[in-house]
Image (tube, rainbow, N blue to C red):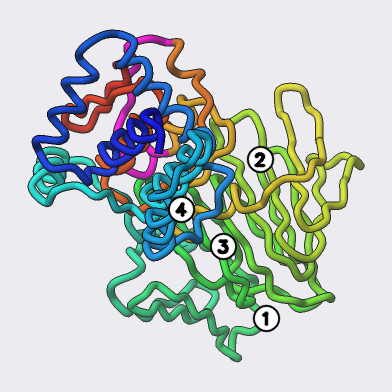
Amino acid sequence: MTGQDKLDERLLRYLLEEMETSEREEVEAWMEENDQNRNYFRDFQKTHLELLWSVQARETRTDFNTFRRKLRKPLSVKLWYRVAAVVVLMVSIGGWFVWSESSKNEWLTRNEMIQPGKVQAKLYLSSGAAVEIGGEARDLKEQDGTSIKVSETGKLSYEKERANASAKAVMNRVEVPRGGEFSFLLPDSTTVFLNAESRLRFPDRFVPGSERIVYLSGEAYFDVKRDPRSPFLGCLEHSAVKVTDTSFNVKAYPDDTNEATTLISGTVSMGIGTTEQWIVLKPGEQGYYDATRKTLLQQTVDVNYYTAWKDGVFAFYRQPLEEVMKTLGCWYLFDTHYQNEALKSILYTGKINRHASIREVLHTFELMDELTFDIKGKEVIVRRK
């Protein structure tokens, strides 16, 4: 192994906290010797982190041990970076870092004001009454006679009483606050996953043979119950999505200037308001409406970046740091301040465990670039190192 490879191995072990205190002090002393050493260490971090996002998150700890055995043989610096990429990806996805317990506990205690989001939502009846759903079973009654059973997990079951079968359906609404997420079944057994700061309005029953119309603000993933006689229509602020049997993700927050529908399976038609402009999406495609330019586009995408949130993962592809921190802030409930406005435009690609501690998340960003984060109460301050 060359001297350069040995240096890279030491830096890798330093990043993974696999060194004794004396060894860490030696590396830190080496970095303090001159700017050349400090710049080399920063370039080492940035290079292998840029490579890691092309590696899938299926590697395990056993795979890493296999890599480490191979590392005993002379390897090129380029291959060293690939090994580091696998390791750091495992760290960011799995939400674990090889820290000492004392360091980890210190951070968790110091930053306990900022916690990951949780399952929570409210069901609003047609009367305007708000009911917390999840955690407690409830039996509710709507004005049209519909019975609503809420399980302890928040599952909603709608049952129309025969005596009032001809009564007009009334509207219900499920709202998920900042720092929340929730999944439930619509009256037709369509599965809905609602992301933070989202709301869905829907009737307490769907009429057979008629369109099943729902109204969304925010982000949701739908797995639509098949019913060819009754197309499913999702209405957004500017556009609409029409399906019969499919799975798709919709993102349409009120403060955004665009709306995106990403198709996972089946077929979806996406249109703009009441116009005749419609596009038909195939699996792996996204319909994108730009409200500023009033244009409707169609493109092929990696759907995993748009659906990972429902599976407990944040996934970003070349997104400005400002957008990334906005997404994280909505989940962890913090505000972000930037030492320099230019930091907002740094592009970020990667995946983060949605339920990791705030320190684990920010540590990933500190490896990504020359950034550091100060936490003060419910605020995160971003600045250059």
The amino acid type of the residue labelled 2 equals: Glu
Please name the residue shown 41% across and 27% down the image: 44
Where residue 287 appears, x then y in whole percent? 76, 44
Mark 1 is surrounded, within 10 Å at the Cα level, by few (under 14), some (14 to 19) or many (20 or more) other residues, namely few
Query: Distance from label 3 to label 4 (Cα)?
Result: 32 Å
Determine which of the numbered discs, if any, sits on residue 363 in the image: none
Q: Which corner quadrant holds the C terminus?
A: top left
Determine which of the numbered discs, if any, sits on residue 171 in the image: 3
Query: Between disc 3 and disc 2, whose residue precedes?
Result: 3
The amino acid type of the residue labelled 3 equals: Met
Q: Nearer the viewer, mark 1 or mark 3?
A: 3
Please name the residue shown 50% across and 55% down the image: 57
**Quarter-wise, where is residue 329 in the image?**
top left
- Above-or-below relation of 314 to 57: above
Q: Nearer the viewer, mark 1 or mark 2?
A: 2
SS at badge 3: strand
CB atoms at circles 3 and 2 under 8 Å apart? no
Where residue 185 appears, x then y in whole percent? 54, 73
Horizontal side, residue 330 vs residue 75: left or right: left
Q: Which residues are magenta?
A: 328-341
Residue tagged 4? 313
Mark 3 is surrounded, within 10 Å at the Cα level, by few (under 14), some (14 to 19) or many (20 or more) other residues, namely some
CB atoms at circles 1 and 3 under 8 Å apart? no
Where residue 198 appears, x then y in whole percent? 49, 48
Query: Distance from label 1 to label 2 (Cα)?
Result: 31 Å
Residue tagged 2? 237
Residue tagged 1? 166
Q: Nearer the viewer, mark 3 or mark 2?
A: 2
Where residue 225 appears, x then y in whole percent? 69, 75
